[in-house]
Image (tube, helix red, strand yellow):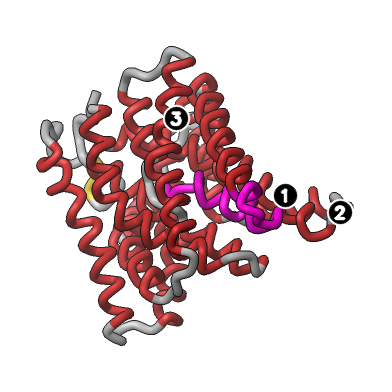
Amino acid sequence: MWAKGIPDGGLHPGPAREKPETMLAILSQLLPFFALIGLGYAAVRRGFFSEDAIDALTRFVFWFALTAMLFHFSSELSLGQIFDWPLAGAYLVATGAVNLLALTVARLRGEPLGVAVVEAQTAVIGNTGFLGIPLLVALLGREAVAPMLMMLTIDLAVFGSLFTILITLSRSGRMSAGLPRRIGRGLVTNPMLVALALGLAWSATGWTVPGPADRTLTLLSAAATPGALFAIGGSLAARGLDRVAVGGWLSFAKLVLHPAAVALALLAVGRADGFAAQVMIATAALPVAGNVYMLAQHYGVAPYRVSTAILMSTLGSLVTLTATLVWTK
């Protein structure tokens, strides 16, 4: 069930690693990743790095290191290997259900539609790119890539587009003629989706990546994990807090309800056992993604509420992710 090798620098198989059998063993493997997050947090809080420096680091990871990693992974996979349609359907239904629940709870509290939409997105969009792929590939092996890429694509293409549609409706009360074009432009300019698509296209040719290009991608990809984790910590230190009770609820939805919903959906389609199910449930247990904060800030809708959920869910995920990996092993 576990991969036979652990990627070296995020890309190439290394020596075999035994599957952790206890919560303590898994926790000991998770701690270095969260230590890097803590280091980034402390560096900003102590003034060694400014917010601008963290923003620059985030851009480097997002546009170069992480996209190189995604291209390299997807260039060795086919579309059929990434998209297992029963699994994709289960994830889509589970995520949609938690999204709808969070939106309904927000509306019942009297929140306007725009705020409810932001809260719904916060409850289901995990930090798959910056945290999940580096962390779970290191823990579970390279075989974990395909289910995570499937989930990342659904998050960006389906729920990202849904967010844009609903936030537009909350502002204008109607669908604008330019909305489909804006959604399409957002998809084709997202570097993670572009890297994934280009990697799959390269894979379809049957060619191997030339040696110099392969080594360049390897060097960039090696920077993705430490850079992303450090940037996560630094960005957490730079954000304010708001509505802690709501942040706690959204963190609970993301860390507990979302993986539970994914597990139930997988059970419903008869795919709750096996390696892919373990990866999907663990990925669903990741903390809230930073891009939800960027969207909330862009639209001016409850950004500090989202940042509170990001901070609380990141701290809480050390416990819940460990428990999830033990439970699904």
Question: Is the residue 20 above or below the residue 124 in the image?
Answer: above
Q: Which mark is residue 176?
A: 2
Q: Secondary structure at mark 1?
A: helix
Q: Secondary structure at mark 3?
A: helix
Q: Identify residue type, mark 2.
A: Ser
Label whose residue precedes the other's in the sequence (2 or 3): 2
- Determine the CA span between mark 1 and mark 2: 12 Å
Image position, residue 142 (x, y; %): 30, 37
Q: Which mark is residue 166?
A: 1
Label whose residue precedes the other's in the sequence (1 or 2): 1
Q: Which mark is residue 262?
A: 3
Image position, residue 161 (x, y; %): 67, 47
What span is in magenta?
A: 106-128
- Given residues 99 and 236, the one toward you in this image is 99
Picture mark count: 3
Q: Identify residue type, mark 3.
A: Val
Quarter of the image that includes the N terminus: top left
Q: Secondary structure at mark 2?
A: loop
Q: Identify residue type, mark 1.
A: Leu
Question: Is the residue 100 above or below the residue 275 in the image?
Answer: below
Would residue 47 be seen by someone viewing this image from the given angle? yes
- Determine the CA span between mark 1 and mark 3: 23 Å
Would residue 184 be seen by someone viewing this image from the given angle? no
Which tag is nearer the camera, tag 2 or tag 3?
Answer: 3
Image position, residue 80 (x, y; %): 51, 24
Label whose residue precedes the other's in the sequence (1 or 3): 1
* Residue at x 50%, y 44% (from the top left corner): 124
